[in-house]
Structure formats: C-alpha cells, structure tokens
Amino acid sequence: MSEHRASIAWQVDAQGFSPTVYNRSHNIGFEGGVQVRGTAAPDFGGNPEDVDPEKLLVSAVASCHMLTFLAVAAKKRLQLVSYDDNAVGVLEKNSEGKFAITKIFLHPKTVFAGETQPDAAELADLHARAHRGCFVGNSVKAEVIVEV
C-alpha cells in the first residue's frame, strides 16, 4: 500500500491569539514542494483568497473521480479529449447534529473524439465504475452524487 503526506504550518501574527481573534491562514505543503495557502471557510473567519478544508475535500473527491474515470475510459480504448467538473459540497448538520460535508455533487462534462462515442448508458456505466473505484470517494462518509 502507500502513504500520502501533507505538512501544516501555522504561526501567530500581529493580531495575536485570543478566543475571539486569531489568524486562520496557514501553509499546507506536499511532497515535491507544492504549497497551498490554507484557511478556515470565510463563514468561520477565514480568508476568501485562501483554500479551506471543505474545498480541499470536495476537490479531492472530484479529482479522484476524474482520475479513475480517465483510467476506466482508457482501458475501454475510448478517445477522451476533455473532462470538466464543477463539484459542489454541501455543509450542513448531519444525522448526529454535527456540521459535516454531507453530500458532494459532481457535474462531469466529457468530450470524446473518434468513431467510438459512448451513449448515455455507457457514459453512466463509466461514471459508476469510476465512482466505485475512487479511493477518496470510498474514504468519506459524505454521499457522492454524480450528475451527468
């Protein structure tokens, strides 16, 4: 199996640290040197120019579904030209009364080239296979809904 690492670094800034006032921005680092500026969601005092954990979760599910879809389509020898998605995560109280991302809606749009074009049923099957094979989707409690 494999391990996947991220580093998180935060420091107090000029506004200090108290129960009501503190900086939420931090650095998220990944192997290979990629850095992302993280924060809390804007509704929870975060900087809207940075990326909050909720968006990271939604993007991780959407990215994993896409990568799995690419693998499934490639094995079928389909000529995929593009894949675009505008995923949406819903933050609400779950059945336990706790805030959680309870649903993630994927809206994939695909374009294929060549003579072999999947019909609606084949496309739905490709997405169902991608959904079942997505490591990240299999790791979250949120319901993942693919709306083709």
Image (cartoon, helix red, strand yellow):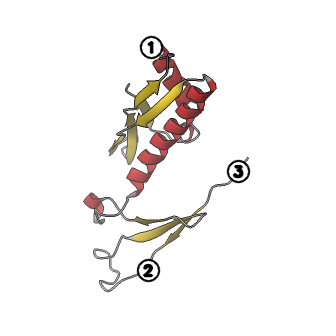
Q: Which residue is mark 2?
A: 11
Which numbered disc flags the more N-terminal residue, 2 or 3?
A: 3
Q: Residue at x 49, y 21 (%)?
A: 114
Residue lying at the far bottom in this picture: please name it.
14
Q: Residue at x 55, y 42 (%)?
A: 136
Which numbered disc flags the more N-terminal residue, 1 or 3?
A: 3
Considering only vertical position in the picture, is 94 above or below 46? above
| Circle 2 or circle 3, nearest the eye | 3
- Distance from label 2 to label 3 (Cα)? 30 Å
The 10 Å Cα crowd at callout 1, few under 14, some 14 to 19, many 20 or more, is few
Identify residue type, mark 2.
Gln
| Circle 1 or circle 2, nearest the eye | 1
Which numbered disc flags the more N-terminal residue, 1 or 2?
A: 2
Q: Which residue is mark 3?
A: 2
Q: Nearer the viewer, residue 116 or 138?
A: 116
Drawn side of residue 29 relative to residue 22, left or right: right
* Displayed quadrant of residue 14: bottom left
Identify residue type, mark 1.
Asp
Which mark, residue 3?
none
Which mark, residue 119?
1
- Distance from label 1 to label 2 (Cα)? 53 Å
Residue 127, horizontal then vertical, whole percent: 49, 25
Label 1 with label 3: CB-CB less than 8 Å:
no
Label 1 with label 2: CB-CB less than 8 Å:
no
- Distance from label 1 to label 3 (Cα)? 36 Å
| Circle 1 or circle 3, nearest the eye | 1
Identify residue type, mark 3.
Ser
Asked if residue 95 shows in the view, the reply is no
The 10 Å Cα crowd at callout 3, few under 14, some 14 to 19, many 20 or more, is few
Considering only vertical position in the picture, is 127 above or below 51? above
Q: Residue at x 63, y 26 (%)?
A: 75
